[in-house]
Image (tube, coloured by chain):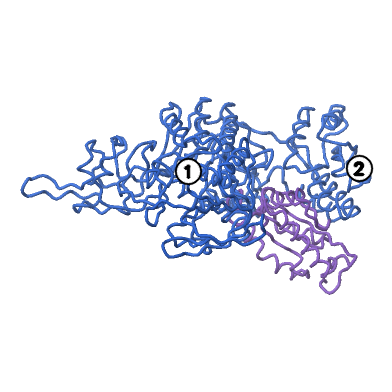
Chain colours: A purple, B blue
């Protein structure tokens, strides 16, 4: 499969971004599909950003935060979880497969986990094909 | 128009070995508002930094993007360089093309190069939208809190106090000392643990700058570096400590018996007890759960009067206390008391627990003659249940054969993958102490391998072999309980490649060090994170071993990971030095990456107020209307409010909407 999906990732700087850095330290290999935008907390991510990324043609979006109970800001990740609940429906209504969006809790100690998630997500997106706005079929408008 | 300078780092071959640095540099030149794109072998080196500084001084650039490693380690370095050259340090952005680029995509050079271009474009997009910000400074409370009174907390407290800082030492037990107080001797010098520990405990108690809050736990922490407000719960001792002299008379008269945790439950203590003979502070506690309420003396009730003598009938502990520290007529609050303190820095030194033997079903945990190594410490300690006589628990007989089993729960995928680091050495220590005193006892030790990496440690191990202690390389598969309370040991000997079986009188299990369960509760109060092996996570495994992700909170000792006493003391002193830095400065810098509400845009809906994890938002009046307002010093910059604001009135500086949109646009171009 030649298609390399383009994944925009929003990663909280304390957990998932640190986990991605650790993947580097561990030299854990994963496809160069994902590019991270560092945010202080997953609670900083607005659903609008995710929709914007899809509207611009991103094939997938990942939001990564700390595990529950581990949040640097005590409860930011709970707010993220609540906020992202309706997003799947919103995506479906807009003609996107809701599986193009993933919410993951990856700690700063889970370098291998980060690599695994990207690997898996990339494979899923390869099966889904490109963003329907960029000529993907079967999933879009 | 911004003038963005892009600087791409080779990082030796770390980046350049995978990513085509020149291609990335050339691509950066084509990006809007980029005026200069350069590359260097090591951007963080003097020459690399000088290149950036020169371009700023020459007026060529007013925004800087460095494409290199991770901002988590190097952003402060470059920000400082930018600031030195006269540019606001917040006009700097990093593109992570090493840790999240070349290191993880070495299998795909072309893909890694294309990704690096996008990541650089994203950073440039953000940089174009950056605004200069100013840090603020807040005064510091010159006091420190040390949580945990083991050897780590004791050393950290003494170091801080000797540097002139007021130090509160909170210990949940009635006495400081920690696990080290339970040890008999310490490797590799065989110093008597009490002989080197107790003088330090006394010094802590008498130090004018240290206040010990024993039998206390941290209830709540709020605030930030330099200005933490801490609530400490002083648990109810049911003894007036201001009067208690520590004579121990009450502990003699109390009739209630309960297992003694200090002796690892191998003997009993009374309900009225002093933790151990050298306790500091030496004060009695009534363990109310096990108190029998003798003479009907429930706490808070008046005594009945003896009709014949006309005198009140008191409980034995009350009668014994000549200092009048025990008075059961007082209606003590079972919740104890809350003490509020203000500190500028916090050191967490809460230590560890060892796994109980019951986890290891194959090792016959039901046998009283199978003990953990910490129980063995108590058995051979002069203050232990047998007063230092080596007697096996089942019948008080002297054992003829003793077996030591290493790596119980450590280096074991069923429990913990990590090495507990101290077990090999303390097992050898116990074996040596026994062998030196009782040469006739046969000692068999079973190891995966002997890890004796430390100053003087390997010599200590070699000496043990010379004493005639038997070392087997290989695991113990299990134990069988035999009549007469003996145990059959079933093991593998790697040197002869054969199975071995023999009978043993006493078995010592070196169970793993782990973080106590209640550490989770403290972690939540402080906002601490955990590492992969479930200890508290330091800021950086190499460069920030005592710092945490929370500014002003530091780690020392086994709560950060298993370590021996020399390493614990080193870390405690390092943590004290790190904690002293803000205290000595008198003020701390508060980074400008915090949220701000534009009152003219705010509709006063109040949605943000309950969302703030720090209660930093309140309602105020602006132009005669209710408007939300953020308390700058309480805001930590998570951006939860910013994302929730329906009016878009809240700006998180450093992560503004326009900046994030520019990044999304660059990544999806």
Residue B618, can we see it?
A: no
Numbered tag placed on residue B179 in the rendering = 1
| SS type, badge 2 | helix
* Chain-order first, disc 2 or disc 1: 2
- Report the residue marked by disc 2: B25
Q: Which mark is residue A44?
A: none
Point 18% across, 52% down: residue: B295
From the image, which quarter does the N terminus of chain B lie in?
top right
* Percent of width and height locating residue B244: 29, 36
Q: Which chain is home to disc 2? A: B
Instruction: Identify the image quadrant of the C terminus of chain B.
Output: bottom right
Image quadrant of residue B82?
top right
Q: Residue at x 74, y 37 (%)?
A: B90
Q: Quadrant of residue B95?
A: top right
Q: Is residue B7 left or right of residue B539?
A: right
In the image as oriented, which residue stretches furthest toward the left?
Answer: B308
């Amino acid at each position: 499969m030649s298609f390399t999906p383009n994944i925009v990732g929003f990663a909280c700087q304390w957990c998932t971004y640190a986990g991605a850095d650790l993947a580097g330290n561990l030299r854990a290999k994963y496809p160069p599909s994902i590019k991270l935008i560092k945010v202080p907390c997953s609670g900083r991510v607005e659903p609008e950003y995710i929709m914007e990324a899809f509207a611009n043609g991103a094939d997938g979006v990942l939001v990564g935060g700390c595990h529950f109970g581990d949040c640097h800001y005590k409860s930011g990740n709970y707010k993220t979880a609540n906020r992202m609940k309706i997003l799947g429906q919103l995506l479906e209504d807009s003609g996107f497969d809701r599986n193009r969006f993933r919410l993951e809790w990856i700690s700063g100690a889970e370098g291998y986990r980060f690599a695994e998630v990207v690997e898996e997500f990339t494979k899923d997106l390869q099966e889904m094909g490109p963003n329907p706005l960029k000529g993907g079929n079967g999933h879009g408008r | 128009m911004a003038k963005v300078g892009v600087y791409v780092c080779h990082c030796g071959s770390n980046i350049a070995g995978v990513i085509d640095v020149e291609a990335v540099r050339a691509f950066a030149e084509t990006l809007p508002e980029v005026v200069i794109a350069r590359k260097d072998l090591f951007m963080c080196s003097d020459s690399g930094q000088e290149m950036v500084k020169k371009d700023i001084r020459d007026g060529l650039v007013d925004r800087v993007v460095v494409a290199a490693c991770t901002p988590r380690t190097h952003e402060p370095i470059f920000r400082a360089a930018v600031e030195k050259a006269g540019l606001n340090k917040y006009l700097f952005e990093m593109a992570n093309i090493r840790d999240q680029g070349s290191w993880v995509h070495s299998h795909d050079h072309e893909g890694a190069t294309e990704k690096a271009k996008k990541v650089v474009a994203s950073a440039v997009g953000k940089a174009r939208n950056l605004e200069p910000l100013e840090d603020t400074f807040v005064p510091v409370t010159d006091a420190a809190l040390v949580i945990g009174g083991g050897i780590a907390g004791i050393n950290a407290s003494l170091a801080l106090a000797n540097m002139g800082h007021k130090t509160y030492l909170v210990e949940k037990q009635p006495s400081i000392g920690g696990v080290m107080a339970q040890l008999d001797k310490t490797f590799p010098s065989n110093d008597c643990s009490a002989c080197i520990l107790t003088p330090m405990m006394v010094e802590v108690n008498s130090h004018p700058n240290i206040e010990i809050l024993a039998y206390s736990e941290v209830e709540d922490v709020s605030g930030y570096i330099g200005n933490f407000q801490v609530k400490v719960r002083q648990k109810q001792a049911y003894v007036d400590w201001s009067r208690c002299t520590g004579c121990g008379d009450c502990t003699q008269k109390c009739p209630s018996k309960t297992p003694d945790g200090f002796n690892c439950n191998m003997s009993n203590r009374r309900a009225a007890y002093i933790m151990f003979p050298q306790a500091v502070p030496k004060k009695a506690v009534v363990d109310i759960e096990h108190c029998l309420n003798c003479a009907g003396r429930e706490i808070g009730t008046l005594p009945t009067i003896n009709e014949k003598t006309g005198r009140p009938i008191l409980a034995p502990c009350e009668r014994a206390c000549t200092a009048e520290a025990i008075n059961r007529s007082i209606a003590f609050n079972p919740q104890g008391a809350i003490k509020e303190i203000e500190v500028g820095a916090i050191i967490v030194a809460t230590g560890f627990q060892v796994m109980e033997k019951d986890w290891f079903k194959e090792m016959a945990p039901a046998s009283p003659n199978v003990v953990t190594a910490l129980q063995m410490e108590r058995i051979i300690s002069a203050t232990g249940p047998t007063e230092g006589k080596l007697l096996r628990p089942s019948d008080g007989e002297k054992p003829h054969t003793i077996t030591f089993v290493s790596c119980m729960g450590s280096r074991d995928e069923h429990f913990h993958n990590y090495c507990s680091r101290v077990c090999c050495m303390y097992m050898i220590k116990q074996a040596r102490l026994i062998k030196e005193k009782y040469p006739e006892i046969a000692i068999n030790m079973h190891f995966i391998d002997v890890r004796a990496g430390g100053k003087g440690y390997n010599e200590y191990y070699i000496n043990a072999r010379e004493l005639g202690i038997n070392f087997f390389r290989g695991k113990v598969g299990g134990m069988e309980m035999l009549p007469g309370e003996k145990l059959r040991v079933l093991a593998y000997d790697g040197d002869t490649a054969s199975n071995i079986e023999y009978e043993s009188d006493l078995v010592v299990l070196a169970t793993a060090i782990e973080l106590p369960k209640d550490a989770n509760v403290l972690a939540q109060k402080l906002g601490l994170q955990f590492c992969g092996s479930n200890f508290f996570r330091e800021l950086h495994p190499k460069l920030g071993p005592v710092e945490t992700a929370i500014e002003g909170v530091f780690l020392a000792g086994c709560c950060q990971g298993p370590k021996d006493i020399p390493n614990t003391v080193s870390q405690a002193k390092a943590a004290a030095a790190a904690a002293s830095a803000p205290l000595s400065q008198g003020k701390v810098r508060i980074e400008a990456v915090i949220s701000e509400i534009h009152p003219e845009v705010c509709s006063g809906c109040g949605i943000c107020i309950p969302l703030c994890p720090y209660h930093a938002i309140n309602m105020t009046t602006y132009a005669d209307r209710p408007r939300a307002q953020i308390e700058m010093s309480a805001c930590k910059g998570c951006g939860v409010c910013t994302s929730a604001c329906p009016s878009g009135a809240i700006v998180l500086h450093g992560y503004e909407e326009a900046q994030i949109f520019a990044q999304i646009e660059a990544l999806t171009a």
